[in-house]
Image (cartoon, helix red, strand yellow):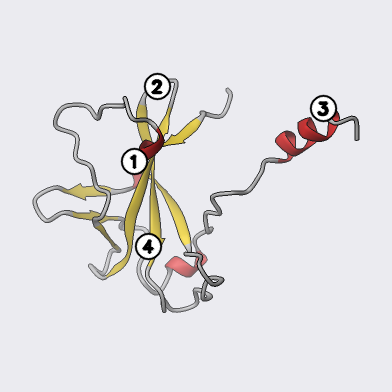
Amino acid sequence: MSSPILRRLRDLPTFEMATGDPDPRGWPVRGSDGQAFGTVTELLVDLETRRVLYLNVQLDRGLPGVPAPAPHAETQILLPLEAVNLDTEGGSVFVTALRRDTVAKYPPFVDFILPAEFENAMQRALGS
C-alpha cells in the first residue's frame, strides 16, 4: 500500500469540506486532563480520497519537556483525525492519549523534511 499524497488545505482552493464537517483550524487542542496544549493551524488532506487525515497542531510555548523552537519557528505535531474528538459545540479538539505534561514524548512534525527517496531522485537527475 502506498503512502497518501498529503496537501495542506490552504493549498487547495477548490477543495470543499463535506457538508456538516467542521473546520477546526484555530481551535485549541486539549488533552485528557482538559488542559490546552496547542492550536490547530492546518488540515492535511489525502488527494486521492479527498479526506482530511491529519490535524497540524502548533504547540504552546513553555510546555514541560518541550524544547523552545528556533527563532521564527514553531513546534508542531500531527494528530491523526481518527485519534481526536471534535467538540463542535465548544470549539475544541480533544485527544485523550496526550496531556500538557506528556506531549513532549510525541514526535514533532517538521514541515520541510525531504524524504530520502526524493533527495536520491534529485541527485540521480543531476547526475550526482
Q: Closest to the observer: 103 or 111?
A: 111
User: Mark 3 and mark 1: span between their CA atoms?
Assistant: 38 Å
Disc 4 on helix, strand or loop?
Answer: loop
Q: Nearer the viewer, residue 33 or 44?
A: 44
- The three-letter amino acid code for the residue at tag 4 is Leu
Q: What amino acid type is highlighted by mark number 1?
A: Glu
Residue 54 in which image quadrant: top left
Q: Earlier in the sequence, mark 4 or mark 3?
A: 4
Q: Earlier in the sequence, mark 1 or mark 4?
A: 1
Name the kind of residue labelled 3 in the image: Ala
Real-space CA distance between mark 4 and mark 3, rounded to the nearest whole angstrom: 43 Å
The residue that mark 2 highlights is 49
Query: Residue 108's spot in the image, x, y percent?
Result: 52, 59
| Residue under label 1 | 82
> Which label belongs to residue 125?
3
Q: Residue pushed farthest left? A: 89
Q: Earlier in the sequence, mark 1 or mark 2?
A: 2
Where residue 97 appears, x then y in whole percent?
36, 58
Q: Which residue is mark 4?
A: 98
Q: Is residue 26 left or right of residue 87?
A: right
Secondary structure at badge 1 equals helix
The label nearer to you, 1 versus 2, is: 2
| Rendered image quadrant of residue 31 | bottom left
- Residue at horizontal 36%, vertical 24%? 50
